[in-house]
C-alpha cells in the first residue's frame, strides 16, 4: 500500500474525531476545520508513516494543541500590534491595505523567530517595533548591552536563514 493510501485511510479513520476534539477547544467550526486540516498537512510534510503511530489520537491531539497555541499566540501578537497602531495620530495611521501587509510581515517575522528563546524575541521586537536602543532594551530585560547585541545577532541570523527581511 502506498504512503498516500495509508495517510488517506488514517485521515478517514481519525479526521472526524480530531475535528470534534479541536472544536470543543476552539468553539469555532472554521478554526477547528483549519486546525484539523493543518494537523494532517503536518503529517504529510513530515512524511510520517501512519502505521508507525502507536497512539493516533494522542499523536494528533499533540500536533493540534501546538497549532492551537500558535494560533492564539499569533492573534495576541496581532492584537497588540493593532492596539499600538490605534495610538498613532490619524494622519500617520496606515491604510487598511498597509495594515494587512504589515500584519503579514509581522506573522512572517513571528514564524521566523518561533524557535528562539523568549528573551531573544522580546529584544528583537523592542528594537524593531519600539525603536529602542540596546541600552534601554538591556535595562528592560535586566541584561547587559552586550547580551542584547548577541540576542539581536541571533534574531537577525534566524530571519536571514528563513528569508525574512526585518
Image: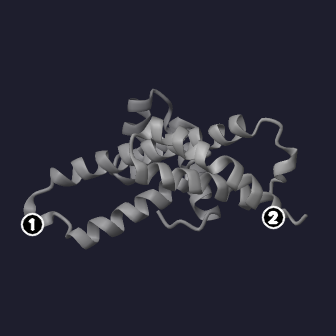
For image coordinates 36% across by 61% down, the residue present is: 103
Which residue is labeled 2 in the image?
5
For image coordinates 53% across by 65% down, the residue present is: 164
The circle drawn on residue 91 is 1
The secondary element bearing badge 2 is classed as helix
The circle drawn on residue 138 is none
Residue at the far bottom: name it.
97
As drawn, 102 above or below 48: below
Categorize mark 1 by other alpha carbons within 10 Å: few (<14), some (14-19), many (20+). Answer: few
The image quadrant of residue 116 is: top right
Locate the N terminus by quadrant.
Answer: bottom right
Residue 5 visible in image: yes
The secondary element bearing badge 1 is classed as helix
For image coordinates 44% across by 31% down, the residue present is: 141
Residue 150 visible in image: no
State the image coordinates of residue 39 (x, y, percent, origin top left). Answer: 62, 51
133 horizontally vs 117: left or right = left
As drawn, 144 above or below 38: above
73 horizontally vs 151: left or right = left
User: Is residue 25 or residue 77 the one in the foreground?
Assistant: 25
State the image coordinates of residue 78 (x, y, percent, origin top left). Answer: 34, 51
State the image coordinates of residue 13 (x, y, percent, origin top left). Answer: 71, 49
Residue at the far top: name it.
142
44 horizontally vs 106: left or right = right
In front: label 2 or label 1: 2
Mark 2 and mark 1: span between their CA atoms?
A: 57 Å
**Lower position in the chain sequence, tag 2 or tag 1:** 2
108 horizontally vs 133: left or right = right
Amino acid at each position: 500500500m502506498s504512503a498516500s493510501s495509508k495517510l488517506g485511510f488514517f485521515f478517514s479513520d481519525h479526521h472526524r474525531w480530531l475535528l470534534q476534539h479541536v472544536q470543543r477547544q476552539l468553539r469555532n467550526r472554521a478554526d477547528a476545520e483549519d486546525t484539523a486540516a493543518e494537523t494532517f498537512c503536518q503529517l504529510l510534510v513530515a512524511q510520517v508513516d501512519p502505521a508507525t503511530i502507536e497512539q493516533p489520537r494522542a499523536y494528533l491531539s499533540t500536533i493540534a494543541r501546538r497549532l492551537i497555541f500558535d494560533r492564539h499566540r499569533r492573534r495576541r501578537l496581532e492584537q497588540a500590534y493593532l492596539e499600538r497602531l490605534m495610538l498613532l495620530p490619524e494622519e500617520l495611521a496606515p491604510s487598511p491595505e498597509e495594515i494587512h501587509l504589515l500584519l503579514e510581515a509581522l506573522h512572517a517575522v513571528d514564524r521566523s523567530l518561533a524557535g528562539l528563546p523568549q528573551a531573544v524575541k522580546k529584544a528583537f521586537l523592542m528594537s524593531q517595533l519600539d525603536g529602542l536602543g540596546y541600552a534601554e532594551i538591556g535595562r528592560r530585560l535586566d541584561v547587559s548591552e552586550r547580551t542584547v547585541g548577541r540576542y539581536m545577532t541571533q534574531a537577525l541570523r534566524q530571519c536571514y536563514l528563513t528569508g525574512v527581511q526585518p
